[in-house]
Amino acid sequence: MLVDLHSHTTLCNHATGSLEEYVERAVALGIGEFGFSEHSPWMYQEREKLAPGFDEMPQYFQRVEAVQRRYMSRSRADRSSRIAIRLGIEMDYLPGKVDMAREYAQSNDFDFIIGSVHHIGTWGFDQESQQALYAQRDVREVYEEYFGLVIDMISTGLFDIVGHIDLVKKFGYRPKDGYRDLQESVVRVLRESDMAVELNTSGMDRPVKEFFPDQRFLALLYKYKIPVTLGSDAHAPSEVGRYFGEAVSQLKAVGYREVLTYEKRRRISVRL
Ligand SMILES: [Zn+2]
Ligand SMILES: [Zn+2]
C-alpha cells in the first residue's frame, strides 16, 4: 500500500486547491492513506505569513475532519474510493520554541507530527529569496549547523517523522568533500529514537533534482533499520504522490519492504 503523509492546504498562503482535490488525486493514484501536515502556526511570524496563524488552526482541523467524514464513512457505497485520511502537522523546529511545540502536540489530537528544520538561526535557508547567503558562507559549516539542528530536533523526542532530512541541499550547494560523516551522526541519534524518516519526493522538483534523502543516504538508513514513510510535500493537488513510482523503486532497491503510517501517534506498518 502507498501512503502520502506530507501535504499542505491554502491556509499556509502558499498552496492551492481544496482538500477534496488533494484526496481525489490520492484516490486516483491508489494511495491508501493520505495525511495533511500543515505548517505549524509559529511559522506565521517567522516567515511572512507562510503558515496559518494560531487562530486559523481550528479551521484546518475542521476541514480535515470534513474530508475524513466524507471519505472514511463505513457506509460509503463506492469502496474503490475509500481512503484513510490522517491529521498531521509539520512542526518547524526552532530551538527557542520547543516548549511551545510540546504544549501544542499535547493539546491537539494529531495522528502524526513531522519535525522539520527550515531555519538556521534566523536564516530561512530553504527560501528562494534567501538562497544568496549560501554563496557567502562556508557550505560545509552550513551543513554542520543544519545537521546539528536536525540532531537536536530528534533528541527532543517530540516528533514522529523527520521531514526532508537533508533539505539543506535544496539549491544544489554541497560541501566539496561530501557529508557522509554528518549523515552517520544523524543516523546514530535516530537509532536511539522512535522516529521515522520520510522519503520526501519534492526535491525532484527543486534545483537539486533528487529526493530528500537521496538513495545512498536511504541505504544508510536501511542499514541501521530506521523506519521510513513517504511524503510528496504537495502544495497543489497535482503534486500529490509525485514521483512515487521512482520512490518505491529506490526504497525497494535499498531493501525496504514496509513504510509507516500513523493513527493517534501510533505507528502502523504497511507493506509496500
Ligand atoms: Zn510549505
Ligand atoms: Zn518543510
Image (cartoon, helix red, strand yellow):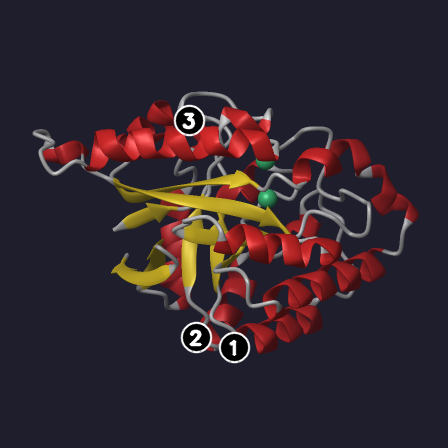
Q: Which mark is residue 237?
A: 3
- The answer to whether residue 78 is above or below residue 106 is above
Check contact, mark 1 vs mark 2: CB within 8 A: yes
- The answer to whether residue 17 is above or below residue 65 is above
Say which amino acid is labelled 3.
Pro
- Badge 2 is on which residue? 225
Say which amino acid is labelled 1.
Arg
Q: How many marks?
A: 3
Q: Residue at x 37, y 34 (%)?
A: 64
Quarter-of-image position of residue 208: top right
Q: Position of residue 104 (x, y in %)?
A: 55, 50
Q: Between disc 1 and disc 2, whose residue precedes? A: 1
Q: Which mark is residue 191?
A: 1
Which sits in the foreground, 180 or 32?
32
- Assess disc 1: are there few (<14), some (14-19) or many (≥20) residues with their C-alpha within 10 Å of its C-alpha: some
Name of the residue lying farthest toward the right: 136
- Assess disc 2: are there few (<14), some (14-19) or many (≥20) residues with their C-alpha within 10 Å of its C-alpha: some
Say which amino acid is labelled 2.
Lys
Check contact, mark 2 vs mark 3: CB within 8 A: no
**For the residues carrying marks 1 and 2, which lies nearer the camera in this image?**
1
Q: Is residue 212 visible?
A: no
Q: Between disc 3 and disc 1, whose residue precedes? A: 1
